[in-house]
Amino acid sequence: MFRVIIQMSVVVVCVALLPVLNLLQAAPSSVEPVRVKLISETAQVVPGTWFNLALEFKLEPLWHIYWKNPGASGLPVEIEWDLPAGYVAGEIQWPAPERFELGGLINYGYAHAVTLIVPIKAEETVELGAVLPIKAQASWLVCKEWCLPGEASLSVELKTGDRAVPSAEASVFTTARTQLPESGTPWSVSATIEAQTLVLTIEQTGNTPIPRELYFYADHAGVIDPSATQSFHLIDDRTARLEALLAVEQSESPSTLLTGLLQSTSGNWAIEAVIGATAVVPVVPPPLDLSYRTGFEGLLLDLGLPGWLLLAFVGGLILNGMPCVLPVLSLKVFSLLQHSGQSRAQTLLHGTAYTAGVVVSFLVLAAALFALRAVGERIGWGFQLQSPYFVVVLTVVFFLFGLNLLGVFEIGGRLVGADAEVSKRKDIFGSFGMGILAAVVGAPCMGPLVASVSGIAVQTDLLSGLLIFAVMGGGLASPFVLLSIFPRLVTYLPKPGAWMESVKQFMGFLLLAAVVFLAFVAGRLGGVDAVIGLLIGLLILALAAWIYGRWSLPVKPQRTRKIARWISLILCIVAIAYALRVTNRAYHTSANNAATSTSDGAWDAWSAERVAAALSQGHPVFIDFTASWCLICQVNKKVALRTEATQALFEAYDVVPLEADWTRHDPAITAELERFGRSGVPLYVLYTPDGEVTVLPQSLSSGIVRKTLEKALK
């Protein structure tokens, strides 16, 4: 009922505002039993960039239209574009089809509704503000017990502008992308021909089990007989075999390249394979005796859960030295100096509150991770920093902390020389909050030992996984627990005094440096628009903090203080809401164009296909699994990977360098990380044409890269 009401409301609004809506989408064209309209994901197009149009089909019950390979009969949807000069249309992005039986013949297509997305490249020299008429002539065949040809002339008018603006139909595109097949499979797939049968052998290489049923759709007609029954069975727990009868055309004029998709009730996966050879996705999994599974770490991993917990604790302890956690730890050290005169009971209470904040945050993040994975999302540890919302909120927190330390405003009295009652009561919540902040910032850091044990945690059972992350949080908090249990250790720290005011302000600049880094992350997620939106939000926040700090002082009249607080609160809400909206919109716009972007310099974007292609040509492959919000990754790039020495080394050994950028959510990269027992970045892998796989340490130097290449390629 709610959906009907919404649809009726949309119809009424469209009738009233038809001249305006014509700028966003074409009027629907109806050819019974098909209703189709041309829609745009953006209401405003940026010259020189890609944007998406789509044909949205809605069909009457029991009718269907056809996929790019219609099967035994039928015709696929075709589109002829009439675009402005300089505009280029890409290929149709076909959602995964379903099967229909018609007179004993099996056809491939869509029932009920389907959205066919087509990327369009805009011309670079179009004047801003120009209205662009885009026309499309669509044709299709729709069938029930009988078939009807259909066609429609569709059009849409879009404006050009300096930034992309989502249209009212943007959510349709988001939903449509969930129906597209995943690029590559989590298993190894090989294709061979035995007599008149195409045989696909599926082997489990990681932790993702093979479904109990699979069906193969060939991208092109004339490869397999779609009406013949396909045979699928499990050979053992990790191997399956799918057999499909070859079409007459394939038997008479065989092709060597096989493309299509595998379908089960749990998902759809695109594959590309050379018949008679291993499919290009995925590549050979790493051997069990890799360097990161040997020595102390390997010994503990072999002990099972007790060893995993010890690794988690030590890994959490090491996180205290990672650069992403240092801004928060500096605040905690300052707090210890501030409260160095407290009793042992008070100090222990602060340490317990801080530890509780850390552990609870780790458990909440882990629970969210497991819940998302349970509903089919392929994500890993550190997923929160892939969200523009999380990046904006964390930036706001750091910015306000920094302004507070710089003296723009004060909360709860002076930080230096606070009275004993405040120290005893209110600062307990501050310690708890500091623990939350330390966990939130430190969780995505893949320090030594954390990478392997977190990879195990996200793939083991729920209770063991939560326990591992809780112990990891305990390791992160352990230095401050130790200082709380033995408060005399604090006496070795400098005595509180007036000098702490300068230290406090210096720490404010450290937090502002963290804000700069988070702005960089937002820029990688959403481009310049995201950074500008975030900076405008921070400017409004600064104004709110200034008003609060200047007119809410105890010396001001009560009415003045009240008004200042309300104004500050309203400005904060406006700033955060604006930054969230603009950054999220910019992120989605950037994500839609991500396929057209390339990695920096000589590094190409990673894909399993590129790995297999390079190896088949005899080239070693070096893969950098990275993310812009991973500080260790950025340091390794500067000191070891993006240097002239390393580039010369790659050229000397004919190495193909690839970058797997995990800054935004990417299920294919997540699956590849899991194959190596990892749940996050960084990860550095070297493949050689003879099948050897080497995993490098997480902290790199040019010497480590050189020695690894010399040893593997000698």
Image (cartoon, rainbow, N blue to C red):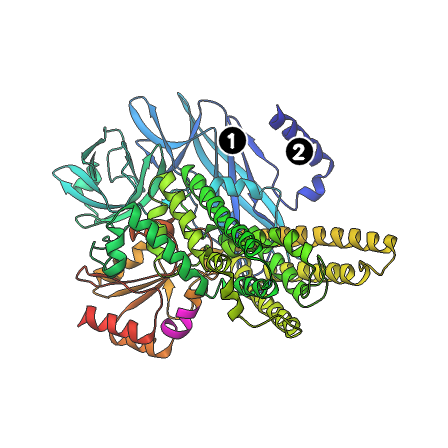
The residue nearer to you, when weighing 214 against 548, is: 548
Q: Which residue is mark 1?
A: 58
* Disc 1 crowd, CA 10 A, few/some/many (<14, 14-19, 20+): many
Q: Residue at point 70% right, 31% down?
A: 12
Q: Residue at point 65% right, 56% down?
A: 423
**Drawn side of residue 132 relative to residue 59, left or right:** right
Q: Position of residue 412 (x, y in %)?
A: 71, 57
Q: Quadrant of the N terminus?
A: top right
**Drawn side of residue 504 relative to residue 617, left or right:** right
Q: Position of residue 623 (x, y in %)?
A: 32, 62
Mark 2 and mark 1: span between their CA atoms? 17 Å
In the rendered image, residue 457 lying in the magenta stretch gets the answer no
**Drawn side of residue 410 relative to residue 346, left or right:** right
Amino acid at dot 2: Val
Per the rendered image, the range of residues in magenta is 635-642
Q: Is residue 589 shown to the viewer in this render?
A: no
Q: Quadrant of the C terminus?
A: bottom left
* Disc 2 crowd, CA 10 A, few/some/many (<14, 14-19, 20+): few
Q: How many marks?
A: 2
Q: Quadrant of residue 403?
A: bottom right
Q: Is residue 104 shown to the viewer in this render?
A: yes
Amino acid at dot 1: Lys
**Which secondary structure lies at badge 1?**
strand
- The kind of secondary structure the magenta stretch mainly shows is helix
Which residue occupies the extreme left position in the image? 195
Q: Which residue is mark 2?
A: 10
